[in-house]
Amino acid sequence: MSSQTPRRAFAFTLLVLTSSSLALTTFAQTEPTNEAPPAATTTTHGVCGGPAIGGKCHSVPRALRLKLIAIPAILLASMAGVCLPLVSRSVPALRPDGNLFVVVKAFASGVILGTGYMHVLPDSFDDLTSPCLPRRPWAEFPFTAFVAMLAAVFTLMVDSLMLSFHTRGNKGKCSAAVAHHGHDIPPLPQGPHCHGHGHLVDDMSSEPERPEGAVDKVEDDVEAGRTRLLRNRVIVQVLEMGIVVHSVVIGLGMGASQNVCTIRPLVAALCFHQLFEGMGLGGCILQAEYGARARSVLVFFFSTTTPFGIALGLALTRVYSDSSPTALIVVGLLNAASAGLLHYMALVDLLAADFMGPKLQGSVRLQLVSFLAVLLGAGGMSVMAKWA
């Protein structure tokens, strides 16, 4: 299987989510309704179909100034958060096999979990239950919960299929190398999908003789390391997709808003949010053992999506209204899909994988400290939901 498979699956997933949102938007707009929203109905964003105007909080110059400050501030916070784990190998206390790294990763996973439950999901409920939308079908069916559920199941499917494609495409490469060398010490393949842990190679290469059955043991170790590596890479790709979708959406809404009272606390909240969420993603990227170019691409997309969304919102200020029915439906559905994806990734691929793994299972004290870190991360994001 070609190495392009995960990238194609990643792009296909994003395309499916976007297409589903547009399809449901079209369905909602063509659905005959008996109750249309009043023309003057207002929401927290302003008049339905138009920007919020008037009031002491509405100021275009001050809002523009805050947005221009927000773009570099959020960019720097995002880069700092996602790059911090990537340079942790040079700090002995923060090495991936250290206890402190495990605790920091648990904290960042709690941040991602809190983001999905306390930020993305409530925003989707607000959008899809807005009085600016027709009562049928949006008030008669919980679309947010439905789409979030489908997104979680779809993420499981993509997660499983991408790992299967990786495994089938590379099956036999590592085992062929082991079989080719017979009872000699097999050098682990240097390709992107067939390398194990360096200390394993060093320890084994120092032994002049090997007992009977050692070839099978080496092959099993190589296979286990390769599968773990592929799993980590799948986690990074799927997690990045969910974060990117949410970041663009929240950046677009902030860029199009002229409400100074909303933007000012949102700038600080997003900086902290991107910092800690980046730490969680950076830890996953580190464990995936990507090369320098792949790391740069992942860091670039995470760091620039929110500033890009803000810039896009600025460019579309005159034509984009976050209280129009089309915007509410599209953004609400995308947020619901992103919430389901983040819930699955945080609980299954990050927290469950770590807490059920041998490192945490071997130390009750480390488990309790990590649980506390998760609660602090999720609790911090919950408090931040007051402003963001």
Image (cartoon, rainbow, N blue to C red):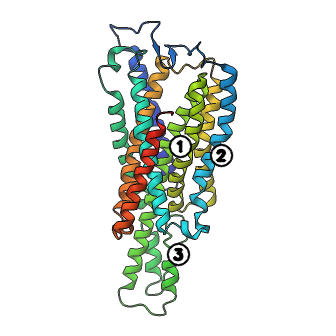
Residue indicated by mark 3? 198
Estimate the spatial distance between the alpha carbons at disc 1 and disc 2, rounded to whole Å. 12 Å
Q: Quadrant of residue 30?
A: top left
Q: Amino acid at mark 2?
A: Leu
Residue indicated by mark 1? 273
Mark 2 closeness class: few <14, some 14–19, many ≥20 residues within 10 Å = some
Estimate the spatial distance between the alpha carbons at disc 3 and disc 1, rounded to whole Å. 34 Å
Total marks placed: 3
Say if 326 sits above or below 294 in the image: above
Q: Amino acid at mark 1?
A: His
Say if 17 sits above or below 365 in the image: above
Q: Which mark is residue 76?
A: 2
Say if 273 sits above or below 207 in the image: above
At 45% from the left edge and 74% from the top edge, which residue is drawn? 176
Q: Which mark is residue 333?
A: none
Say whether disc 3 or disc 1 marks the residue closer to the N-terminus: 3
Q: Are marks 3 and 2 in contact (CB under 8 Å)?
A: no
Q: Nearer the viewer, mark 3 or mark 1?
A: 1
